[in-house]
Amino acid sequence: YDPHEQIQIRVQLATVLRAVVSQRLATRKDGQGVIPAVEIMLNTSRIRDMILDPQKTKDILLAIEEGHISYGMQSFDQSLMQLMTEGLIDFAEALQLSSFPEDFALRAKGVVSADGARWDNFDKAKASSEGKTYWTELPRLELETMLKKPDDANILIKSVKDAPEDKKKKK
């Protein structure tokens, strides 16, 4: 966009965007088709500010990774790590699909960088998930995975009026 249009586009995007869900299909470790690795971004006030401010836009991935527990967001690399630790995909497939292969390889070996705090909540959620894939339990979105055949995955997103937390508050 032309420079004079960029501010208007950022404002429009920040105003109308609700969420972004992207997927990469990973070959299952057992060879029985594919499984989606899913990146989820909700338009929280922090994300909205990052969209509006060109200097902060580069930090959106960090906000996604840090928003795992609070908002149910996750990066592709977090999703791949979860699929790998659950034994659904192998390391080579996860590494090939990761957004940052060098960082992913170090993380898989247990090496945490100075900014590793953004994965703290992810690790805690992973440890307590008891084999559940956390992204299916988003607070304001309901995701359903429909596998019509092993090589065909579709994610359907439906808005949920009453999130689980909201129902608890009403009682």
Image (cartoon, rainbow, N blue to C red):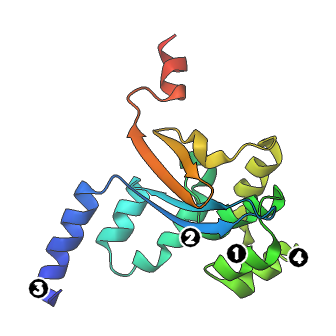
Q: Distance between the residues labelled 1 and 2?
A: 9 Å
Q: In which quarter of the image is residue 37?
A: bottom right
Q: Label 1 is placed on what type of residue?
A: Asp
Pointer 3 or 4: first along the chain: 3
Q: Distance between the residues labelled 3 and 2?
A: 28 Å
Horizontal placement of 101 versus 39: left or right? right
Q: In which quarter of the image is the N terminus?
A: bottom left
Residue 138 drawn at (x, y percent): 54, 42
Q: Do the residues labelled 1 and 2 touch (CB within 8 Å)?
A: yes
Q: Are marks 1 and 4 in contact (CB under 8 Å)?
A: no
Horizontal placement of 125 versus 34: left or right? right
Binning the other alpha carbons within 10 Å of mark 2 as few (below 14), some (14 to 19) or many (20 upward) gives some
Q: Which of 74 and 83 is in front in this view?
A: 83
From the viewer's perspective, is residue 164 above or below residue 13? above
Mark 4 — residue? 109
Mark 2 — residue? 62
Q: How far apart are marks 1 and 4 (CA)?
A: 16 Å
Residue 68 drawn at (x, y percent): 61, 54
